[in-house]
Amino acid sequence: MTSLADAYARLPHAGGMRLLERVSAWDAHGIRCLTRSHQRPDNPLRAAAGLSCVHAIEYAAQAAAVHGVLCGVLTRGPVLLLAAAGDLDLARPYLDDLPGELCIEAALEARAGASARYRFVLASDEQRCASGTITLMPGPPAAAAAS
């Protein structure tokens, strides 16, 4: 599987919440994605004041989830939950005022089944906007979640 659309088909994100536009590189150790979705006025994460830099965590989580699909770890589409975010460095208050593409890099630090920990960096025009770590874990099975 090589297309971003194919990867998103295995994830729960739909419509405007598909924040990533391209995968520019990936291998077993990480992924690099590009997007201009931070500039869209209809970005679903955008508030009246703008798109907060804290949403870099969601961009990184989507890149990590796409990486899991591309690597064949998420073959049956378990819903992944963002279990933790840490070591955050948010270098600016907002993302939507960046004129260039966002580059999201997520490097795999550890994996146990579908659970994974990634170190991420978001940058625009080589200016670091945010960095940190995220941990993704499978959510409960659909039947358990419904009860």
Image (tube, grey):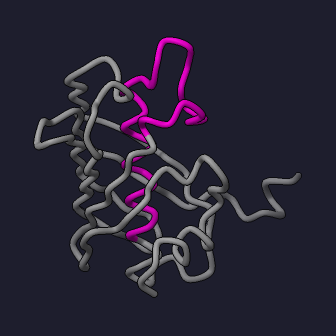
Image location of residue 128, percent across then percent down = 15, 36
**Outermost residue toward the right in this view:** 147
Q: Which residues are magenta?
A: 38-67
Please tell me whether residue 89 is drawn above or below residue 72 in the rendered image: above
Q: Residue 124's spot in the image, x, y percent? A: 21, 40
The residue at the point 47 percent across, 70 percent down is 114
Q: As rendered, which of 123 and 147 lies closer to the eye? A: 123
> Quadrant of the rendered structure where residue 146 is?
bottom right
Q: Is residue 64 magenta?
A: yes
Q: Residue furthest bottom?
A: 1
Image-based side of 121 in relation to 7, left or right:
left
Left or right: where 58 falls relative to 125: right
Residue 20 belongs to magenta span: no
Q: Residue 143 location, x and y as percent? A: 84, 63
Asked where in the image residue 5 lies, by quadrant, the reply is: bottom right
Residue name at image x 27 percent, y 69 percent? 24
Query: In the image, is residue 81 above or below residue 28?
Result: above
Nearest the viewer among 76 and 145 is: 76
Which residue: 11% across, 43% down?
Answer: 126
Closer to the camera, 76 or 43? 43
Instruction: Residue 13: give x, y in percent of width and height.
Output: 62, 56
The residue at the far top in this view is 49
* Number of disc labels: 0
Position above or below: 141 against 37: below
Residue at image coords 36%, 37%: 56
